Image (cartoon, rainbow, N blue to C red):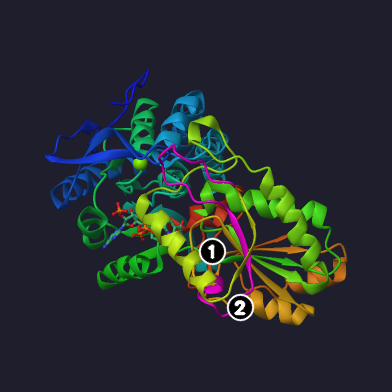
Amino acid sequence: MLHSPHDLVRSPLIGGELITTDQRHPVVNPSTGEIVDEILLGGAAEIDAAVVSAAAASKGWAALTAPERGRILRNIGAAISARAEELAEIESIDTGKPTKQSLSDVALAARYFEYYGSIVEALEGSVVDLGEQGFATVTNEPLGVTGHIVPWNYPIQIMCRSIAPSLAAGNTIVVKPAEDACLSTLLTAKIALDAGLPAGVFNIVPGLGAVAGQALADHPGIEHIAFTGSVPVGRHVAAAAAARGRASTLELGGKGAHLVLESANLTKALPVVLSTLLQNGGQTCSAGTRLVIHKSLHDEAMSMLRDLMSAVVTGPGLTDPDLGPLISQKQLDRVEGFVERAVASGAVIHAESATPTGKGGFFSPARVIGGVSPDSELAQEEIFGPVLTVLPFDDVDEGLAIVNGSRYGLTTGVWGADFQSANYAARRVDAGQVYVNGFVAGGGVQLPFGGYKDSGYGREKGAPALKAYTQSRTTVTSLS
Ligand code: NAP
Ligand code: MG
């Protein structure tokens, strides 16, 4: 069992109570491959109990004023910050993330509560003047009970990204985190209740996707479902919600690109390209995993990347390396499969980081790979590992065609000192977030985030996400 100075939660938390089930599931530390703890999973019965509990708490929570709810949310943010080191340690053990990344994820989780706990006070309705006949008010009402399906790659961060705006808007929630990494999400639920959230407002049920996740997507008491994960499962979840006539938000990953124009400053660009590739072992939906680079810069860039790569330190998450392990043996096999198939069909490995040997764990070296066409598997599929695919181009329109020649459209970076061509390119990128001379995978609590094309629909983060968790009610008052 993991040692925690406080109160690690290892089971569903429903109506403020810890629930015992008979389905045990191991907690694996990806840095060692060892089982370090055990959790209890819930199924359809626990999901149903969680929805019933959330529905019972709904009226009371929605009846609080925005400043009252906002204050509780900001208190939750402060409580998360106060336990940042503990939460980050748990996240690093559960996912293999380097400590610095876990600390950054926890800081972001706290920021979601601070941000939505603040801006909810400014969520004003409007009045429509109907002249002598009267007037109408348009108010922002909560949806009811919202469901949140969370993946294993950024457990605490992705969960807080969607629950904070929903709670701020006056909804009560049921969360289904991924069974492969959910300790930080379970503890966050407890922290939120201890910080003043009424029992039943926040319910969480760790469980298998096909069982607990499916039950949540199908449940008639769920008014909206927020999903982050793979394309096929996301579409399946959205179809289940649509079959009940309810909306969803889908965040389904990406194949982000760095478009490096002829005028780009490589010394500025490449360290960012590499660090955002290494972030979370490349298991980041918004990672920039294609280097679409002007031919005149290609050789110099490969040489610089070889130098940068030689300094990359790989190791267990808690030693705070540059690159930690992948989440599981399954994910490691998947990533290695992509690389082996590419190399077998003629791809060239331009740069590679050293892999720790003899230490166990699911370590995959970071690799920069070229010699593939833009329509190859390596250039098209979301690998979810530290693999950067190099795709050279001659002119900016060819570069843009490569960048946009993907089924995904989540995050893209444009690099160029010539402002005219950088702006020309940025305006033609099909992606929900575009960075010019910079790149952030994650971050930006106030910046709307979401995908074009197969990367999903709906936007998270920023003020629009708060509004998305409301429905308007128009009330007409007659004066005549
Ligand atoms: P996934 O299967 O889509 O899982 C995401 C979440 O959905 C998990 O909580 C999962 O539960 C749940 N789920 C699975 N089947 C479900 C169903 N029938 N109904 C409702 N919920 C269900 O993703 P994955 O297997 O973790 O990863 C596979 C690939 O997806 C990755 O290699 C990557 O390409 C992509 N991915 C993208 C993101 C992103 O941030 N956009 C995140 C993770 C993965 P359990 O995992 O608990 O079973
Ligand atoms: Mg784990």
Asked whether 374 falls inside the magenta stretch, the response is yes
Of residues 312 and 140, the one nearer the viewer is 312
Above or below, 366 against 407 in this view is: above
Residue 129 colored in magenta in the image: no
Q: Which residue ends up furthest to the top in the rendered image?
A: 5
Report the amino acid beneath label 1: Val
At label 2, counting other C-alpha atoms closer than 10 Å, the crowd grade (few under 14, some 14-19, many 20 or more) is many
Q: Is residue 477 left or right of residue 463?
A: left
Q: Is residue 168 left or right of residue 435?
A: left
Above or below: residue 449 compared with residue 71: below
Q: Quadrant of residue 24?
A: top left
**Going 41% across and 31% down the picture, which residue do you hit?**
90
Residue shown at the point (23%, 38%) measured from the top left: 12
Ligand 1, what quadrant? bottom left
Residue 128 visible, this orientation: yes
Task: Give the dominant element type of the magenta stretch: helix, strand or loop.
Answer: loop
Q: Is residue 296 left or right of residue 400?
A: right
Residue type at mark 2 is: Pro
Q: Quadrant of residue 477?
A: bottom left
Which mark sits nearer the N-terminus, 2 or 1? 1
Q: Residue at x 29, y 44 (%)?
A: 59
**Residue located 70% across and 76% down the image:** 428
The residue carrying mark 1 is: 128
Whole-percent x, y for residue 386 in the image = 55, 55
Q: Which residues are magenta?
A: 354-380
User: Circle 1 — which element?
Assistant: strand
Whole-Å distance between the Cαs marked 2 and 1?
A: 53 Å
Q: Which residue is mark 2?
A: 374
Q: Nearer the viewer, mark 2 or mark 1?
A: 2
